[in-house]
Each structure stands twice: as C-alpha cells, then as structure tokens.
Image: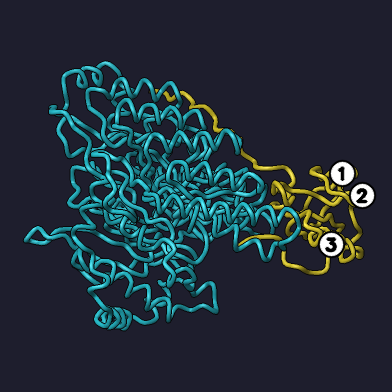
Chain colours: A cyan, B yellow
Amino acid sequence: MDQHAAIPPHARTYRYDAVDRDFLAARIAEFRDQVQRRLAGELTEDEFKPLRLMNGLYLQLHAYMLRVAIPYGVLDSRQLRQLAFIARRFDRGFGHFTTRQNIQFNWTKLEDAPDMLAALAEVDMHAIQTSGNCIRNVTTDEFAGAAADELVDPRVYAEILRQWSTLHPEFSYLPRKFKIAITGAPHDRVAAKVHDIGVIAKRNAEGAIGFEVWVGGGLGRTPVVGTLIHDFVPEAELLAYLEAVLRVYNVLGQRDNIYKARIKILVRDLGDEFRDLVEAEFAAMPRGRYRLDPEVVQAIAAHFAPPAFATLVDDPPALRRARAEDRRFAAWCATSTHPHRTPGYASVVISLKPIGGIPGDASAEQMEAVADLADRFSFGEIRVSHVQNLVLPHVRQEDLPALHAALDAHGLATPNVGLVTDIIACPGMDYCALATARSIPVAQRISERFADLDRQLDIGTLHVNISGCINACGHHHVGHIGLLGVDKRGEEVYQITLGGSATNDAAIGELIGPAFSYDAVVDAVETLVRTYVAHRTQGELFKDTYRRIGPAPFKEALYAPA
Amino acid sequence: MSGPAKARPATQPVAITANDLADGRVVWLAADGGWTRNLAAARIFAPEEAAHALAQGQAAERARRVVGAYAVEVELLAGVPRPLRFRERLRATGPSVDAIPRPALPIAV
C-alpha cells in the first residue's frame, strides 16, 4: 500500500490507493472470465466452486448468495449507498447484515456477480476472504474512535491486520477458517474470547500500546472460551506474534478432520505446549522484518483521523426537554445511545430489529436513509455491529430529537437495543444450505411476544441468540438465552442453553434439557423470562441470576408437569 | 451440517431437484426432460426408478444446465407431490418469511 498518498484529514474509512484498485480490477476481470467459462460449459462445478467461493459467492438453498466484506464493520455514506444500489439493482431490494459485520445478498444471479463486484470496487470494497479456510473479516468495536471508555483506536490495528491477512500466501489454505476480533476498550464489545484470536489493545503504565492475545476461542460444534497466551505484546511485535500463532496452527492443525480442524482443538489438545511453541516460533522469526514501524502505524491512523468536533456540553437543555415531553424518545435515548468521548456527542445504535422483522435485514431505502442521516448527523460515518445493528458514531446530542424523528419515518427507531427483542439470528433454513432448522421466524415470534416496550424495559438487558445449526452463526452459545435449531426426524426442534456471555465474563451457555418444538419454543422463552424476573435481584442480568441460582428453577419451570 | 438427505435407496416416490446454474433457483426435473420451478409440474418417479431418474439429473449437471442434482422423496396428496423432509418443502416453496422486511410495528408506550 502507498502510505505516502494524500489522505483526507477525515477519511472516514481506509482509502485504497492505485495498487489496491488495479489489483481489484484485475481480480474482477479474472472472475468475470471464470463465470463466462462456467456458463459456457467450459468449467465443471467442481472446478468452479473454489473459484466462486474465493470471491464470496456461495450457492444457498434458493439462490446464489454474495457475502461482502465490510472491513471491521466500518462504512462511509458513499459505501452504504452503493450497497443499497446493489441491493436494488441485483437483489430483491434488501441486504442482510451478519454477526461478522458483513452484508449478504441472498438472491444473487451468477451472471450478475462480476458486475456486483465491480460496483463494490468503485467504493473500495470486495468479497475476498469471506469464504474459505483463510483469515476472514477482522471484526472490532462498533464504537471504535468514539467510545468514552476506549484506550486505543482498534480500527488502526484492524486495518493493519486486514492488510497483513489479505492474500497472505502462507495463510490462504489454513486447516480451517480463521476469525480475529480486536477491541481497544476495557469493556469487550467484540466477543474477543470466543474468536480464534481475540486481541485486546491497551496501554501500559508508560502509556505504550500493546495487546493481550487470546487464542483458541470459538463457538460451533465445540464451543470454548479462549486462552490468554500473552498479556502484552508490544505494538511493534503485533504482526510477528500473530504470524507465529498462525504458523503453529498452520503446521499442526488437524487437516484430516473438518470437525477438529479449528485452532481451538489444537489449543485444547496441546495445553501449555501451544504457548511454548508460539513463543519458540516468535523467538526464531526475523523480527526486524515483521516490526510494525511507527511511521506505518501513523500513516494508517491518518485514515481514521477524528472529525472536527464542535465544543459542546453534555445533556443540553433541548435534549432534556425532548426526553421529558416524549416518553418514546426518552426510551430510545436510554436504549439506543452510547457514551461518546467528546462532550455533547453520542453514538447512536440504529436497531435493525423492528418488532416482527428479520434481524439484520435492511431495505435499500433504509440503507440510503441511513447514509443520508450519516452525512447530516455523523460526519458520513456508519458502523455495523456484530449484533446486526447499524451505528452512527458521532451525533450531536442536541440533534438526537431530529435524528430520532428521521429514523422513525423509515422504521428504524425501534427502542429495543440490548433488550429481549434485539435478537441475534442467523439466516437459518430459510436461506442457508447448511441449516437444520429455521431461525428467522422464531426470532420474529419472540419479538412479537415481547413487543410491549414497558415489559421489555422492565425485563432489561437480555441477549437472545438463535442459530439454525451447530455451526452457531447466531452465536447461541453466548446468548443469555441461546436457541439452537436441529433436525429431529425431519422436523425442527430447538435446544435451549442458558447463562452464556460474549463479553468480559465470557461463558458458554449450558443446555437446560430436552428440546422444544417450533410451536412450543416461544412459550419456553416466555417461561424462562418469567422465571428470571421472579428470581432476580435489583439490576441483576439474566446470566448473573442464572449463575447465582443455577439451572434448577428454570428446569422446574420448563419441564415440571402443569 | 445439514444438506440433501444422505444417499440411500428410495422407499417412496421421488422427484429430482437441483439449482439452476445461471440464477441458482430451485428447479425440478419435468416430464418433458426439461427443468421446472414448479414442483407440481415435476415428474414423479417410482422408488425403483430413482437411480435412473437421478442419472438424468446428473446428465443435465454434466451438460452445465443445473448444479447439485439429487433425489427427493415425496408423498402425493391428491396427486400433488409434497416432499417428506421439511428442508425440501422449504426449497420447494421458498423462504417461510417475507423477503422484504416488514415495516416496524407500533410499540405501545
């Protein structure tokens, strides 16, 4: 990458240079040729499948699906408008935001895929490494560069990891896919401990930047919380250390069994020896070659230079008045805003979980509306959260009433962020070829059951996560209440796990008992919530109540004969 | 992982399904040897014909018209085929949820 190219003072996203753009153009031309050869009958599906997957194109139940990388969930308004254009021109007018902070287009035609990639390239985006046994999209905190509690801006290091991992020749054919998350705040909002590598950026007593490195976390068939293998890798050594981890995994990961191929199995099997092997590899590496030059870090940080914030005060009178006059607005402020580091500003979460809606779906019109509102209220910046919502990171608090009204007009002001209806759900069997049961309609029915806002607010923060198969794209293991849909003799049933957490106290939920049918599962969730409300202490979250009182009261409520 | 049912000798009538190469949509082998998007228009084969029927689907795959041909067991309800497995019923009818997001319902405050 050309680090000397002029970077706008507030670039919003990392901007490609001529080398990046030329590469993407060549890659798209290559794929266009491959698609034409496939359609002309010159390539078999066996020959073509790995080629399309390398470009993010899957074949799902009802159509091809294009998965587009949104690097660490950061978008600018121009990019979001382009995603809206793609949704309208090539899909059915909507897109689905995922737990990897990506977007999927579920109704792609093979012949359109190269044009879709060309449209993405116009705004410095692509679909490379959204499939396959490689390093996938690095995820980070949706409040990066804005959060009041942030110590280090993780976007800078996420971008460095993106450049390092993109087309890395040594790591293009790993034993299995590989997922990295990085955060720069003490409050883990990225599920770092359930990633193949979780990186927590922090500062030491001298103010120098370094990284905690967790390895071997993951969900799927074998859910496990990661292991801390280094508590402070200095900034200059970040790439060398992660390269050492990947090398050990690449050599020793179990390639002959897909179910045992993730790094978590290797870490589990080797125990402390894994750390020893990484340290030995790290010690043997030509460290100068891998050293992260402060000038490079600075050049990348320039892409994420903060916007020109005004001098404002927190909680201005106009905002206080609006909250007092409009209870719905007050509820939205309470649930959908997040503390900003700059006085007078807030980060705003835009719920993509309307009551009865499809979690993570946004129409082209909604994407365009959010892009316009980002330009008007948030310096053109948008984020995608792993909870499948959107974020406007830098909004003046005095603008919150106007923003709320504008979002409301587009069905985007549901005040349920963090509440029981803010459900994470994978596409499930309605779209996914791997799924064993549906997720979306279960999420919709739970959402409708708990639609009453007063009740939701009384229940408080509660994370319900739903996966349509054991691969756990809906992160069900780390939901306070997790639902896993499985196939039982040709029909859908749902296993329930309780007490999971994706944050600092990361934990894998425990299976509570026999599964429930599609028809019965919403009542089961209702029973669990009632049991929690009856037993909780003041301010206690579901997972904490579960840990305090154990499974017995929940089991009793679910399974005792009426 | 889910996916098409594991290959085993069919004991029920079958239809042959695949995805269209060009747009990925679900298609069914029709009586005229072509492919239809309508299961009701699919040719239904007796269990003992399943292997021969699947060979026809696989020939179309080799001819680069469809992808991933396989046999689906069906029951006939008043002459209309209905897949036995839920997954195949979803493939036949499309997603069970609205393709376009619903507008937000009003929330009681």
Return the residue at label 2. B31
Return the residue at label 3. B59
* Left or right of residue A147: residue A140: right
Q: Is residue A318 or residue A557 the one in the foreground?
A: A318
Instruction: Measuring from the top left, give residue A91's x and y in whole percent.
Output: 60, 38
Q: How many marks?
A: 3
Q: Secondary structure at mark 2?
A: loop
Mark 2 or mark 3, which is nearer to you?
A: 3
Q: Residue at x 81, y 57 (%)?
A: B73
- Disc 3 crowd, CA 10 A, few/some/many (<14, 14-19, 20+): some
Q: Disc 3 is attached to a residue of which chain?
A: B
- Residue B90 shows in the view: no
Q: Residue at x 34, y 28 (%)?
A: A375
Q: Quadrant of residue A194?
A: bottom left
Q: Are marks 3 and 1 on the same chain?
A: yes
Q: Quadrant of residue A383?
A: top left
Q: Residue at x 72, y 63 (%)?
A: A44
Return the residue at label 1. B41
* Left or right of residue A252: residue A307: left
**Real-space CA distance between mark 2 and mark 3, rounded to the nearest whole angstrom:** 15 Å
Instruction: Measuring from the top left, give residue A224's x and y in whole percent.
Output: 39, 67
Amino acid at circle 3: Ala
Quadrant where the N terminus of chain A sits is bottom left
